[in-house]
Every structure is written in C-alpha cells, then in structure tokens.
Image (tube, coloured by chain):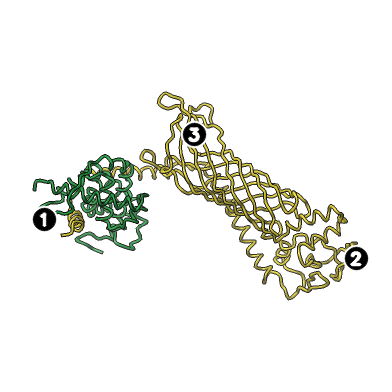
Amino acid sequence: MTKGGFNEEVILTGCRKNDRRSQESLYRHFAKKMYAICLSYAGERPMAQDILQESFIKVFKNIKQYKNDGALEGWIRKIVTNTAIDHIRRRKWTDEYNKVDQNDPGMHISNAAMNIIGFNELMKQVGRLPEGARLVFNLYALDGFTHREIAEKLEITEGTSKSQFNRARKLLINFIGNMNL
Amino acid sequence: MDFLKWYKKTVESADPEPPAVIWEEIRNELDVDTVWYKIEKDLPADRRKRILFMMAAAASILLIIGVGTFLYLNSGVQGSGIPMSHIEHHQGFIRYTGSEPSFQTRLAVALEFPDARHIPYAEDGSIIQAAGRSVYSGEGLYPLQGLRYTSDLLEYDLQLHAGRVTAAGEENRSHRKVLSAKGYYAGLSGNLANTWLLNNKTLQGLRSDDLTASLPSFGYSFGIMAGKNIAGNLDIQAEIHLISLTRQNYNEYLHGKYINNNMQFNYSSLSLSGRWYLSGHEKPGRHSIILGAYAGLLRNAKQDLNGETISLRQDYDPIDFGVITGYEYHYPVGNGIFLGTGFQTRFGLNNIFSGNDLIPYYLNNTRNASINIILSVRYNLN
C-alpha cells in the first residue's frame, strides 16, 4: 500500500530485516502524529519525548509480530498509548492527583474559544492537569476506551476512572476559560 | 461544538515536529542491541548452558516417548493392539488361540497384565491348577496363554502360585487391591526445598574468592494432588501447589558495605508427572522414578536489602516453567492410605528476569532451580 510516497509493505519488509533506512522512514512517517499523542498524555515535552523514543524502540523490536492484519498506524498508536501508561504509572500518578487544587469550574467552553485555541496552547493547559486525571481523560477522550476498560487497564475501580475523568474535564475547561484569549 | 470531539480533533490533526535528537537516540539504542547480538553470536557457546539444555531436551523427549507409547499401546488394548478375535474366555481365564503373537501384542498385554507371563500353563494352553496347587509345565508356550481376566484376580493367582496365601497375605492383597492397576488416587503433597535463583551473580557467589557469597536458601510448597494408574507400572500424577515459595539469599559488597540480599518469590504451580514403579504390586512398599514438567504463576516477588523491602514483581516474568525429575517411595499404612517420601529436582527452562530500566533481560539470565524433599499422603479411590 502506498500513501503519499510511503510504501508500507516495502518499509515493513526493510524494518523486519533491521534495515536502518526503512526504520527511519517509518519513524519519520508516523513520528509527528504519535508525538501529538505523547504530548497529550505526558503534558510536558521531556516526558513526551521519552515516551516517543521508547515507543518506537518497542515498535522496531517487535515489528515481526505485526502481521499486516490491521492498520499499522493503529498498532503503533496502541504501543504509544501503553508506553505512556507505563511512564505515568511509574510516577505514581494517584499521589500527584491529590496535590492539585480543586476549584469548581464551569462545564462549558464557547465555540469561539475552541476556534482560537491551537494545539500548542491546548497542550500547555493539558500539561497543567494532574498526571492521573490526564491519563484517564486521554484514554477516554482520545483513544475511546470505556471506563470499565480504563479501570482494567490501570487496575483502578470504574468509579475512580469516572471521577478522574470528570475532574480532568472540569479542570481543563477551567484552565482554558481562564486563558487570556 | 462538543468539548471532547473538539479535543480529539485538535490533538489528532496536529503534527508537532519532534526534536531530531529522538531519532538519533533510537538509532543508538538499536545499534547497541544489534552489536550485542553480533557479539553473542560469535561467543563460544556456554558449555554448562549447553549441557543443561541437552538434559532438559532429553527429559522432554523421554516424557513424550513415554506418553506416546502409552497412548499407542492403550488404544491397542481397547481394540486394535490385542487381536480380540483370538481371545477366548475359558473357565475365568483368557486364552490366546492365534498364532505366535507379535511383539506389539506381547508388549500391549505385558503392560496391561504385568505379571501374566508367570501364570502356570500346560502345553495345550489350559491352566494347571487345583485347590491352590499349581504345576508349572514349562516349554514352548506363548506368554499370552493363561491370562486371568482381571488384574486383581491375576495378583491373587500369583499369590497362590507362590504359596504365600496366609492371613497376612490376604491383608496384603487388600492393600494391593486398592493399588490395583486401574486405580485413581488423590491426596496432599508438600516439598521442603533448597531453592536457587541461578544467574551470573549467584553462580559467581559460589566461588570462595568472590566478593559475592551465595548462601543456602530454603523454601517450601504444598497443595493437592491426584493421579491415575495408566499402565502396569506407570502412574500419571497432577499436583496443584497454591503456595510455592522460592528464596535466594546472598551477601554482596556494594558501595563500600557488605549487605545481605534476600530475594523471595511466591508462585502457584501446576505440575504433571509420570511415575514409573520399579517394583510390581507384589511388594507392599514401592519405589518409583519421576519425570515431568511444571508451570508456575508468579504471585509476588520481593527483595529484602538489609531490612529494606522492595517489590520485584515488575522485573520478573509472571510465568516460569521447567522439568522435574526425582524418586519417591510409597508405603501402605492401611485402609488404602499410602505415605510417600523421596526427592525431586526442578529446573526452570525460561529466563524469569524480564528486565527493568537499568538492566535488559538478556544481561541477567535467571532460572529457578531446586532440590526438594517430597512428603505425601494419598488415598486410593478404588
């Protein structure tokens, strides 16, 4: 399959042979998209870079396990998401969460504000979220997991997942609402 | 616009440029791995590792051959192996009326009726036996002639032949009845074990001139077991040990201090083994050799470092598996109950260290091994 000069089959064959040029092509093709995902989970650039690096190393080391049975991008994204979860878990996110001030923000944000805010500004506000709440929020909003799936993945209760998600949403709306737009 | 949809769209449509250094870092790490694999390939094979691997492979092959032979011959007993058209029921005995039986037939019958060849018979194939007296006639007859219909009766007949039918003999027979060839059994089993986590550090610690000292460490396991006699002298036994504790104690000189490490792994294990009895049913106590395999599920793992405890659960593989060899002696204590004791060795076949942020899995190849004293009590169900 060729997408914009990127021949997936040829690149995959090269990657399976541990060919550096094929690996670099694959990396450059997906890196930007995956970096955006990493930033949204990490909330900070240094950690997002670590996640991206570790994810692609996992991709290249496990590329033989990819059986061309689905979208390559989806397979890589799953690895990125799982790596992000591992990183955040290591930082004991539940403790971090409890340290955050909990205001009672409004639940809505205007369409005008949504049209103005770009990716970088949004990531700045996402970065202010506590890690645990940010992780749950991204798993739900970005990757479409249900609260039950999130609870199983993170070994927390479904109720905790819901409360973390609601808190993250409220905080994010509040952060955006307080921006000088 | 819905807030969540807007968020997802904003993130997924973004294409921020990751720093160029990330690719360099990825390439460096992959290069390091590639070089290591090349080095490993060129290194002479570890002789000790090769011997252990060959022993494990040989044990596995023996187990497969044993089970395969049983299944093949067992199917013969039920249909194709023993030519039933040449079997006649005659005065409570089985007589073989065909031409000279094949090796396969002899072997199938020998496994089904292990003592059959000792039954007295006459030249015409009839049984010579009256009022407990047996006369051995001797020559030129096939081992299949004169088989008794069931194993229990066969044993009793052997008792008659040997002139050992006494009150004690009757009692022994009742023991043997519950040890009969078709018996199921169940019971409790436990092990007291000298356990080892074999890796470079603990092996080096066995040398007296090394700063690391590996110390004898002990664990235990206990649980339930069940088994069945599947052929003359062969039992197959399954054991579930919910608690199976493995320890490794060692001292090492670290950052200017001599510190004590105590690693402790708690598994739940399942094992399947074949037990080949060296003696027949005529002896009250029986010796057996054990060959089998086990799989363990890691429930928790921790390390005590001079009193400070850290969890190792994330650094070790949740699954361990390996081979079992050993010896066990069973003695009847009455009412179908048997006590067993013996020893067993277990050797893990996989590297249980799965790596962490500091050490990749291939630089700390670690295997479970143990020498166990077996204690068991079992009850024969029929």
Location of residue A67 by image quarter:
bottom left
Whichever of labels 3 and 2 marks the residue nearer the N terminus, that label is 2
Q: Chain of mark 2?
A: B
Discs 3 and 1 lie in a common subunit:
no
What residue is disc 3 on?
B262
Q: Amino acid at mark 2?
A: Ala
Mark 1–mark 2 distance (CA, rounded to whole Å): 108 Å
Indicate left or right for B210 with B129 as reference.
Answer: left
Q: Nearer the viewer, mark 3 or mark 1?
A: 1
Residue B207: horizontal and vertical position, in percent? 53, 30
| Letter of the chain shown yellow in the rendering | B
The residue drawn where x is 11% and y is 57% is: A111
Q: Amino acid at mark 1?
A: Asn
Q: Is residue B166 above or below residue A180?
A: below
Indicate left or right for B338 with B247 as reference.
Answer: right
Which disc number belongs to residue B130?
A: 2
Q: Amino acid at mark 3?
A: Asn
Q: Chain of mark 3?
A: B
- Depth order, front residue of A1/B77: B77
Pick the quarter of the image with the N terminus of chain B.
Answer: bottom left
